[in-house]
Amino acid sequence: MRKKIAVIMALATLSISVAACGSSSESSDSGSTAEEETVSDTESSEAAEEGDSGETAPEITFEGLTVVDNEECSIKITEIDPDDLWGYTLKAEFENKSSDKTYMFAVENASVNGVSSDPFFASEVAAEKKSNEEISFSDSDLEENGIDDFTDIELTFRVYDSDDWEAEDVAYETVHVYPYGKENATAFVRESQETDNVIVDNDYVTVIVTGYEEDDLWGYTVNMYLVNKTDSTVMFGVDEASVNGYMADPFYAESVPAGKSAFSAMYWDDSELEENGITTVEEIEFQLRAYDEDDWEADDYVNEVVMLNP
């Protein structure tokens, strides 16, 4: 959650906008479509280049990908820049073909090597206009956990009428980008640590507390690793939280797409702890919930009281 707020603040300050849209198309400049992308959307060679160490590394050869091309809009991913200032970046071109409507292009969900990572991307495009945009992944949690080589980028694009949220989506599409080719895609597997505290592990989700830290910016933080084993998007949240016996709600809510995992952080502002005279966190208690984000009437995947002793 804290990384999401940080990115949003940075984007607002620097007025950075990014766009996305999704729906199947019949053709593209490079001959690939959203339906074909699972086979050839980012054809690449393993032509290797020699490094100082004498080892070889795969080389990105990206030919472009048309994700959407319908009567109302189009989106093309045109280039990959792994070393952009703002993080690993996909460059894209968006077109609004409507004669009188402004469309919002957005990334609903995204993941890297199977780990959820939201680039916080949304941008408006006026009627009959085009826009060149950048979708950047500036997720420090990925790098901190050894995910520095993007082999499988999954994006869910949505485009809709900016002035009529009740209207049907103009396009909604999930697509994979394989910088080194699909055959070289890898899925992240986190290695367990001696300090891990597995608080939930059932048929639907896994929740692991990976550590605690005093963050100068965000306050007292509980770091977690979440795994969604279901076919639905799962929302993780907490109720009735207390610290050392004093009621204290943390900043926390995490949505994890179907079949994905996520690094997550729950934190308490220092001022709230100070108001309760808490200088050392000894006990944290909360009711953990995990449920289908799109079906509130379904039974919870998790609904239980958790006690932590940092």
Image: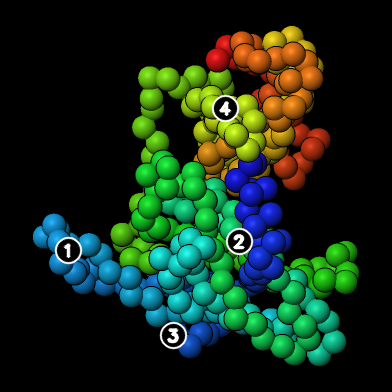
Q: Nearer the viewer, residue 282 or 68?
A: 282
Percent x, y of residue 30 = 44, 85
Dot 3, crowdedness within 10 Å: few (<14), some or many (≥20)? some
Percent x, y of residue 287 = 72, 20
Dot 1, crowdedness within 10 Å: few (<14), some or many (≥20)? few
Given the image, on which type of amino acid does mark 3 rest?
Ser
Res 123 seen here: yes
What separation in Å lies between label 1 and label 2 (alpha carbons)? Answer: 35 Å
- Residue 51: image tag: 1
The residue that appears at 52% across and 74% down in the rendered structure is 91
Q: Nearer the viewer, mark 1 or mark 2?
A: 1
Given the image, on which type of amino acid does mark 1 rest?
Gly
The residue that appears at 15% across and 67% down in the rendered structure is 50
Circle 2 residue? 156
Q: Nearer the viewer, residue 302 or 48?
A: 48
Name which of mark 4 and mark 2 comes first in the sequence: 2
Q: What is the secondary structure assignment of the residue under circle 1?
A: loop
Name which of mark 3 and mark 4 comes first in the sequence: 3
Circle 4 residue? 214
What separation in Å lies between label 4 and label 1 (alpha carbons)? Answer: 39 Å
Residue 291 relative to residue 206: left or right: right
Dot 2, crowdedness within 10 Å: few (<14), some or many (≥20)? some
Name which of mark 4 and mark 1 comes first in the sequence: 1
Q: What is the secondary structure assignment of the residue under circle 3?
A: loop
What separation in Å lies between label 3 and label 4 (alpha carbons)? Answer: 50 Å
Given the image, on which type of amino acid does mark 4 rest?
Glu
Dot 4, crowdedness within 10 Å: few (<14), some or many (≥20)? few
Q: What is the secondary structure assignment of the residue under circle 4?
A: strand
Circle 3 residue? 30
